[in-house]
Amino acid sequence: MPDWNVDPGHYSVEEIAIKMRKYFFEELYAPQFAASAATAPLMGFLVGGFSSGERNAEVWEIQMDKGKCDTPRQMAAATPGWAIQWQGEGEALTRLVRGWSADALNKLVAAGMDRSTAETLLDSVRPMMSELLPIQDAIDLVHYLIDVTCGFVRFSPGNATVAQPIDSAAITPHEGFRWIRRKHYYSATLNTPSARELP
């Protein structure tokens, strides 16, 4: 039986991402699609938070596709600064946050431009927000980005793959994990300091 135990005083976000990959890919995804790996669906996660003793957050990506899953890849290192990361239906946020459409990138590449050069050119627009955000503003920003994505997907052709209600939580070094929105009733004790401690 796998060892899922996490030492709350000595853990890393990478360690959590590795355990998450093992559970979702090795325990669930791979056995489920063992007979049809070539047509297995794309599925992914972003795992973010603070490693033990760290003041800066980091983000790791887990991506499963066609029966395969590489080791978790670091998307944002635990260094001072900020970043916005998203997965799934990304067109709305690519347009809003980065200032361009995936179609524009594909057309530049089709016209002969190197993909990384094209991304650098398109990313040269002014960012939409300041990096100096109080936690409440950061929470409000996330909810705004969720609302934009839901509206964009709702009015785009195809299925509504993203829709309200959506759960959200905040993680900070001094308060740990706290639910902001949940779809079902829960006890307020889940947001007490003792309940926020890692198992």
Image (cartoon, helix red, strand yellow):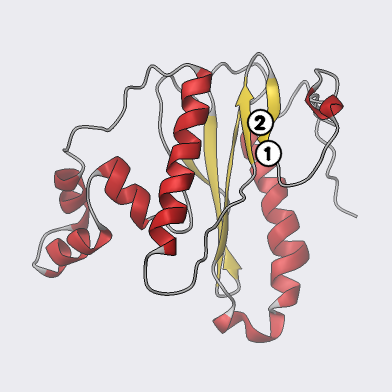
Indicate the position of residue 136 as horizontal and vertical percent values: 52, 21
For residue 16, which quarter of the picture? top right
Q: Is residue 197 left or right of residue 89?
A: right
Which residue sits furthest left?
111
Q: Residues within 10 Å of mark 2 (few under 14, many from 20)?
A: some
Depth check, front residue: 40 or 176: 176
Indicate the position of residue 6 as horizontal and vertical percent values: 80, 34
Query: Real-space Cα distance between discs 2 and 1?
Result: 5 Å
Q: Is residue 183 above or below residue 55?
A: below
Q: Residue at x 19, y 32 (%)?
A: 126
What secondary structure is found at the residue carrying circle 1?
helix
Q: Residues within 10 Å of mark 1 (few under 14, many from 20)?
A: few
What secondary structure is found at the residue carrying circle 2?
loop
Q: Is residue 22 above or below residue 43?
A: above
Q: Residue at x 43, y 52 (%)?
A: 149
Q: Is residue 10 left or right of residue 37?
A: right
Q: Is residue 142 left or right of residue 15?
A: left
Depth check, front residue: 163 or 80: 163
User: Which residue is labeled 2 in the image?
Assistant: 12
Contact (CB < 8 A) between labels 2 and 1? Answer: yes
User: Which residue is labeled 1 in the image?
Assistant: 15
- Which amino acid, mark 2? Ser
Q: Is residue 35 above or below residue 173?
A: below
Q: Residue at x 22, y 64 (%)?
A: 103
